[in-house]
């Protein structure tokens, strides 16, 4: 029996489209030093001409980017969504693999430092402080195998429904110290899988989408006060926090690429009045913040901790941390960033 011509034409069109997706491209580990692999002659297979979107967004009908992650006809048997590797993490780490300390995981160990904190990908489904009523641990249904935490629980691999771009510490190029105003959404989902709230900007409320018990107010849970929508109608966010200008004044700006956002003088300045710290003022990459009279400036000369003199040395938060609980500093060093002037506490 003959088939209608239109159906045959449509079938041929599908084959023509998928032929570019038949086999995954060779693994292209992400080299953040900015050097170019001489075996790769067409960078636009993964990147736009601006090299900022990568294989994660900006698709056209003629795109070749899909095959960087998907394998239509020869995907592993256990893979999800025709991914080119067995697991979500393995697919992500085909590029973000930590080779030589250049990825989101593996950077500390590559520099001889054992991670003290990390988000446990493919290991756990538990969320510390995830219960908004009790502040206790909550079990979440994540996207990884058996409902475990996976990369795509926080990141949107196709760049859809992400938070507003913000200026962060980390810029993944060899000239990272010069791109002061570089903004990116880090592919962060507005609502993480396993989260309980949709948040459009990066700040305490984004962390609280999963760790909701940590920003709860009025539940009897004993947590440090956090600036969030639970505590004020206009909370500080990562791109709008009071940065120390001198020992008595602050100015609003992004915490990214400065250490002065971690210092809150007492008495509080006009810009800080009515605000508590945001989560990231205590939890971020390890660094030496200093004091209001002697702040320690942000200094990054190499990528991923190659230079022990950089401040912060590592820029892998929130994947790994060199301090427990991803704390910026520990002990009195952390507390006195806000609480000092003798024993007088705000």
Image (cartoon, rainbow, N blue to C red):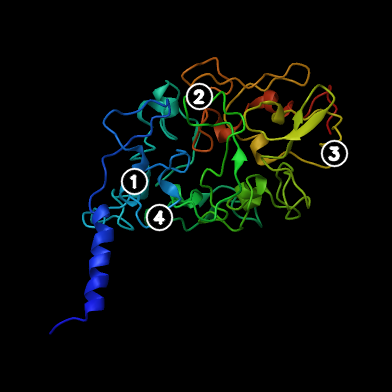
Q: Which residue is mark 2?
A: 175
Q: Residue 73, image x and y in percent?
A: 22, 57
Q: Which corner quadrant of the image does residue 309 belong to?
A: top right
Q: Is residue 124 visible?
A: no
User: Looking at the image, is mark 1 or mark 3 earlier in the sequence?
Assistant: 1
Label 4 with label 2: CB-CB less than 8 Å: no
Residue 60 got which mark? 4
User: Upstream in the sequence, badge 3 or badge 4?
Assistant: 4
Q: Residues within 10 Å of mark 2 (few under 14, many from 20)?
A: some
Residue sitting nearer the eye, 272 or 256:
256
The Cα atoms of the two marked residues, 1 and 4, are separated by 22 Å
140 sits left or right of 89 in the view: right
Mark 1 or mark 4, whichever is nearer to me: 4
Please identify the residue farthest to the bottom as the structure is shown. 1
Q: Earlier in the sequence, mark 4 or mark 2?
A: 4
Give the mark toward the camera: 3 or 2.
2
Left-right relation of 278 to 265: left
At 66% from the left edge and 49% from the top edge, which residue is drawn? 205
Q: CA distance from mark 1 to mark 3?
A: 46 Å
What kind of element bears circle 1? helix
Is 70 displayed left or right of 155 in the figure? left
Residue 49 image offset from top left, x and y in percent? 43, 40
In the rendering, at what x and y percent does residue 245 appear? Answer: 78, 25
Q: In the image, which is nearer the foreground, mark 3 or mark 4?
A: 4
Q: Residue at 82%, 22% (x, y): give it.
A: 247
Image quarter for residue 248? top right
In the rendered image, the residue lying farthest to the left is 1
- Tell me if residue 90 comes above or below residue 15 in the rendering: above
């Amino acid at each position: 029996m003959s088939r209608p011509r239109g159906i045959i034409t449509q079938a041929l069109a599908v084959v023509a489209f998928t032929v570019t997706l038949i086999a995954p491209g060779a693994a292209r580990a992400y080299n953040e030093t900015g050097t170019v692999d001489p075996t790769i002659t067409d960078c636009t297979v993964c990147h736009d001409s601006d090299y900022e979107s990568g294989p994660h967004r900006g698709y056209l009908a003629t795109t070749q980017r899909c095959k960087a992650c998907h394998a239509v006809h020869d995907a592993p048997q256990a893979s999800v969504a025709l991914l080119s590797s067995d697991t979500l993490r393995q697919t992500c780490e085909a590029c973000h693999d930590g080779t030589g300390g250049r990825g989101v995981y593996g950077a500390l160990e590559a520099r001889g430092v054992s991670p003290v904190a990390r988000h446990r990908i493919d290991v756990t489904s538990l969320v510390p402080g995830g219960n908004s009523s009790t502040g206790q641990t909550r079990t979440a249904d994540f996207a990884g195998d058996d409902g475990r935490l996976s990369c795509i629980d926080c990141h949107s691999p196709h760049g859809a429904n992400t938070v507003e771009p913000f200026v962060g510490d980390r810029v993944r190029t060899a000239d990272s110290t010069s791109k002061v105003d570089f903004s990116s959404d880090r592919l962060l989902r507005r609502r993480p899988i396993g989260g309980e709230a949709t948040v459009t900007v990066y700040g305490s409320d984004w962390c609280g989408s999963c760790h909701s018990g940590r920003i709860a107010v009025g539940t009897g849970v004993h947590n440090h006060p956090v600036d969030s929508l639970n505590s004020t109608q206009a909370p500080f966010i990562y791109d709008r926090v009071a940065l120390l200008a001198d020992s008595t004044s602050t100015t609003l700006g992004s915490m990214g690429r400065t250490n002065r956002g971690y210092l809150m003088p007492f008495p509080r300045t006009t810009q800080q009045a009515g605000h508590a710290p945001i989560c990231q003022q205590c939890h971020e990459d390890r660094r030496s913040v200093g004091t209001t009279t002697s702040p320690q400036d942000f200094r990054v000369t190499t990528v991923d901790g190659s230079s022990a003199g950089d401040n912060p040395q590592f820029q892998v938060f929130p994947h790994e941390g060199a301090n427990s609980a991803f704390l910026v500093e520990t002990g009195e060093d952390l507390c006195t960033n806000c609480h000092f002037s003798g024993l007088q506490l705000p």
